[in-house]
Image (cartoon, rainbow, N blue to C red):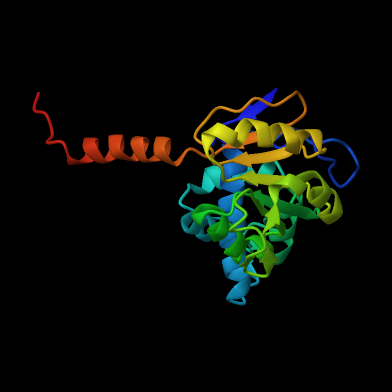
């Protein structure tokens, strides 16, 4: 079973420019690469063509040495005194993260969370095309969410096949999440993102990522409490 929490997984071996498989990118570096990519895309939108490692590191909230080490996993394209070509580096990081593939996303669950995800405009700009949204509530089925029409979850397999969805987001209650996940996997989808408050089981070869907002808030509360606690004297 490949079951992942909110910690980013390592990017698998990718061929470099010579066709030789590159080293696997560590999970922590993968997370930072997504931040660099966001910063680079902001620079592109502002018409900036080159950026120094110091400026990119500052915009990403990391040290220059960490930035350079992370970029070494995808090939270092900086020139001393000149910096990085923003568009080229952005494209190369996107390719290393798999964002140049055609990712079609289906959302199961048309409640508040599912509808918010379906309407989020940032997915398309990052290479993700939301192609379907499902629900079991017949009062919801047929309603429009953004440009999508809510499909009946009873037709899950047929719609996944018709749309070519290769990623599924589960925005479901815990009581039904495992059954729906099993159906998604049986339909051939190998990438699942779950917001359900339950640990799901998937077979080997399926990538499952879990986003537990309650856990994240608990971690945040812990750090907030420590920050507010009076300093202890020796």
Please name the residue shown 40% across and 38% down the image.
214
Question: In terms of image quadrants, where is residue 11?
Answer: top right
* Up/down of 89 relative to 198, above or below: below
Residue ID at (66%, 32%):
179
Q: Residue at x 81, y 38 (%)?
A: 187
Query: 156 or 214, which lies in front?
Result: 156
Left or right of 120, for residue 231: left
* Extreme residue toward the bottom, this view: 47
User: Where residue 180 sits: x, y (%)?
Assistant: 67, 37
Q: Residue at x 85, y 54 (%)?
A: 162
Question: Residue 196: x percent and y percent?
Answer: 54, 38
Q: Is residue 74 above or below residue 36?
A: above
Pick the quarter of the image with the N terminus.
Answer: top right
Residue 172 shown left or right of residue 205 in the figure: left
| Residue toward you, 5 or 108 | 108
For the image shown, how many numbered marks are present on the structure? Answer: 0
Q: Quadrant of residue 70?
A: top right
Q: Residue furthest right?
A: 19
Q: Residue 48: tell me if it is visible.
A: no
Residue reaching furthest to the front: 138
In the picture shown, does residue 215 fall above or below 108?
A: above
130 in relation to 71, above or below: below
**Residue 16 vs residue 11: left or right?**
right
In what quadrant of the picture does the C terminus appear?
Answer: top left
Task: Evaluate whether residue 91 shows in this view.
Answer: yes
In the image shown, does 168 or 68 lie closer to the viewer? 168
**Which of the two residues, 104 or 122, is positioned nearer the viewer here?**
104
Rendered location of residue 99, percent (x, y): 74, 53
């Amino acid at each position: 079973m490949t079951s992942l929490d909110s910690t980013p997984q390592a990017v698998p071996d990718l061929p470099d420019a010579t066709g030789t498989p590159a080293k696997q990118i560590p999970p922590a570096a993968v997370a930072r690469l997504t931040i660099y990519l966001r910063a680079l895309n902001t620079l592109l939108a502002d018409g900036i063509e080159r950026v120094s490692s110091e400026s990119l590191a500052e915009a990403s909230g990391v040290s220059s040495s960490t930035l350079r080490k992370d970029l070494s996993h995808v090939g270092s394209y900086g020139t001393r005194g000149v910096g990085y070509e923003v568009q080229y580096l952005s494209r190369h990081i996107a390719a290393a993260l798999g964002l140049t593939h055609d990712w079609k996303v289906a959302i199961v669950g048309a409640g508040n969370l599912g509808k918010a995800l379906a309407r989020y405009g940032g997915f398309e700009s990052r290479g993700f095309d939301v192609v379907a949204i499902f629900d079991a509530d017949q009062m919801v089925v047929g309603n429009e969410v953004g440009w999508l029409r809510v499909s009946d979850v009873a037709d899950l397999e047929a719609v996944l096949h018709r749309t070519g969805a290769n990623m599924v987001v589960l925005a479901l209650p815990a009581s039904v999440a495992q059954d729906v996940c099993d159906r998604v996997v049986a339909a051939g989808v190998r990438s699942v993102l779950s917001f359900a408050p339950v640990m799901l089981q998937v077979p080997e070869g399926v990538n499952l990522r879990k986003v537990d907002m309650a856990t994240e808030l608990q971690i945040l509360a812990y750090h907030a409490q420590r920050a507010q606690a009076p300093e202890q004297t020796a």
